[in-house]
Amino acid sequence: DAGVIQSPRHEVTEMGQEVTLRCKPISGHNSLFWYRQTMMRGLELLIYFNNNVPIDDSGMPEDRFSAKMPNASFSTLKIQPSEPRDSAVYFCASSTDRVTEAFFGQGTRLTVV
Amino acid sequence: SQQGEEDPQALSIQEGENATMNCSYKTSINNLQWYRQNSGRGLVHLILIRSNEREKHSGRLRVTLDTSKKSSSLLITASRAADTASYFCAPGRNEKLTFGTGTRLTIIP
């Protein structure tokens, strides 16, 4: 398996634009996590899904952020409109069941100018 | 909060020495995981210890768990330059996986 695949690896966008980050979890994994990492705030859990259903989105910073998981092999994190303070590395991770090791993607480095 | 807090924030040691990092948490847990992050990369799982275990080994890694003190430690023996990374703990009670700010470990050749 190729592991968790995130795209794009890098994204530079202008303030106000819509940004969509994509994640393909490892086949057979039924939990998926989205994280944001910055120097100031560390690694924050934004939202996680189990069997494609959002379980906890309490970490989503505001209504500009939304996440979907239309099927077991694909998830998106959308920011609309984007702001400079959204600049961060966004990670997706997946795991096989509720409490086992998680596998992380390589991350998407987002820069909003 | 289920989140763990790693201590120290940063640690620098000579290659070959042992490195010890600590994790404290506040809630009851079912298990605790440790992860490593190399600069610019995603986290990599190192080891999981269950709440009914006190110690676990994996290669040069030794993890202890004291549920009465709500703390865990990660020991890396005979450190190598390749161990330079950030280390995170993740106390687990349910499927929610959260992390602290990590310990930045630097191995000096």
Image (spheres, rainbow, N blue to C red):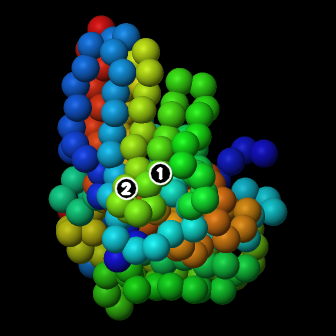
Please state the horizontal and vertical placement of residue A32, each as a whole percent of the image: 61, 69
Q: Quadrant of the C terminus of chain A?
A: bottom left
From the viewer's perspective, is residue A95 above or below residue B84? below
- Tell me if label 2 and label 1 are in contact, CB under 8 Å: yes
Dot 2 falls on which chain?
A: B
Q: CA distance from mark 2 to mark 1?
A: 6 Å
* Residue lying at 45% horizontally and 61% vertically, measured from the top left: B67
Q: Is residue A28 above or below residue A60?
A: above
The image's mark for residue A19 is: none
- The residue where tag 1 is placed is B65
Q: Is residue A58 visible?
A: yes
- Give the image location of residue B26, x and y in percent: 34, 71
The residue sitting at 35% across, 76% down in the picture is: B1
- Image point (38%, 81%), residue name: A60
Parent chain of label 1: B
The quarter of the displayed image where residue A52 is located: bottom right
Give the camera-side residue of B91 and A79: B91
Left or right, B86 with respect to A7, comes to: left
Instruction: Name the N-terminal-most of marks 2 and 1.
Output: 1
Q: Which mark is residue B71?
A: 2
Mark 1 residue type: Leu
| Quadrant in the picture for residue B104 | top left
Question: What residue type is disc 2 on?
Answer: Ser
